[in-house]
Amino acid sequence: GIILGIETSCDDTGCAIVDTNGNILGEALNSQHLIHLNNGGIIPPIAQDLHRQNIENVVNEAYRQSGVSFKDIDAIATTIKPGLPMSLHIGTKYGKHLCRLHNKPFMPIHHMEAHALTARMHDKSIEFPFMVLLISGGHCLVAVAKDVDEFLLLGESIDDAPGEAYDKMARRMKLKNLPEYSTMSGGQAIETAARKSDNPLGFKFTTPMLFYKDCNFSMAGIKNQVFRHLVREEKENNVTADGVIPKVNNLCAAFQLCVTRHLCHRLQRGMEYAEEKGYIPQENKTLVVSGGAACNNFIAEGVQMVCDTLGYKFVRPPPKLCTDNGVMIAWNGIERWKRNIGIYKDFEHIEIEKSSPLGKRLIEDVA
Ligand code: ATP
Ligand code: FE
């Protein structure tokens, strides 16, 4: 099979054409990142306009690169959930339009499932079931991927996602005012600043939820602790002309250490629980980490340590597959095509959803 995938759930317009063996025949991506950075966050109507302006070019570019013709493409896979409704709308409309034009079936795709499953394209040896930690701008969850359309959710964030927390912290610290960081995402900026810290333990933060017997996450407490220190530093130090405190690198490092500790602690609980319940086979333990915040090397090192300790194989797809892209949508289409599920010849009734649980989600009270 050959599937064309379209992604427009947030602020990236992506398209790719992928075959059954996971070969990327063509791919294109238009990121709105810089525009939203200047606006201090994503303004949905602006994101929608940019998707509308770019979708045709992005799809045409992936199609041109692939060298295949529409008659060789088996279906059009498109993200329909979860995400910003105005953004999802553009991709879904365009995907359905292509289906009508070329008489192809439509495959609705769940964005987070796509994040989780792309690892199987990157590393063909990954088999179900496997553990997955998804950390991005909008999500934070630990789950067992039991099958292409079956996930057991063990825990998720009760407030912000890690990427979101990084973005908010970076904005509050005014990192964008420093030329070096002006074009980076909040996550990249804080990771870069933290690497320059000469004293990551200069600020002491308490790891949240240490005594909670579940696998949920929370960023609010970390954020508040950093804010408090920031206010104190701003009062005590003469803030530079850029509005940045002199100890900003140390503060970034302490924040990052606290987030990493928290993620690792909750993940470890999830892994131990899943093993105890027999959800993960002893002889083949794999953890997949994906989502935009999985690009963070410090977090990845922490997670690697948890994997080493518990005997898990650690799989992290390359950054361009961790952040939003069309490839992961096309690949999710392939996974479904192979099993003959989620293929709709009659698709007009399929609608976007702004929030949606993972496929056939089973939630367990982890306590
Ligand atoms: P979702 O997938 O939940 O819908 P999204 O599409 O906004 O969210 P992604 O494109 O997967 O998210 O990732 C973007 C997020 O990843 C941003 O919040 C960004 O700050 C974060 N991020 C990128 N690089 C890093 C990094 N090195 N460290 C931490 N966070 C990072
Ligand atoms: Fe995403």
Image (spheres, rainbow, N blue to C red):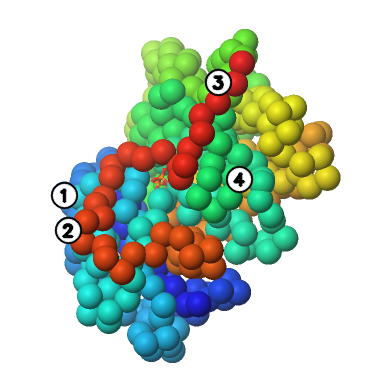
- What type is the residue that disc 4 sits on? Lys
Q: CA distance from mark 1 to mark 4?
A: 37 Å
Distance from Cα at disc 2 to Cα at disc 3: 41 Å
Q: CA distance from mark 2 to mark 1?
A: 6 Å
Circle 2: element type: helix
Instruction: Return the residue at label 3.
Output: 365
Characterize the local packing of mark 4: few (<14), some (14-19) or many (20 or more) Cα atoms within 10 angstroms.
some
Using the image, determine if residue 276 lies above or below residue 328. Answer: above
Q: What percent of the width, then of the height, locates residue 299?
A: 62, 38
Q: CA distance from mark 3 to mark 4?
A: 17 Å
- Circle 1 sits in a helix, a strand or a loop, which is it? helix
Q: Residues within 10 Å of mark 2 (few under 14, many from 20)?
A: few
Whether residue 166 is visible, yes or no, is: no
Residue pointed to by mark 2: 49
**Is 125 positioned to the left or the right of 11 in the image?**
right
- Which residue is the site of mark 1? 45
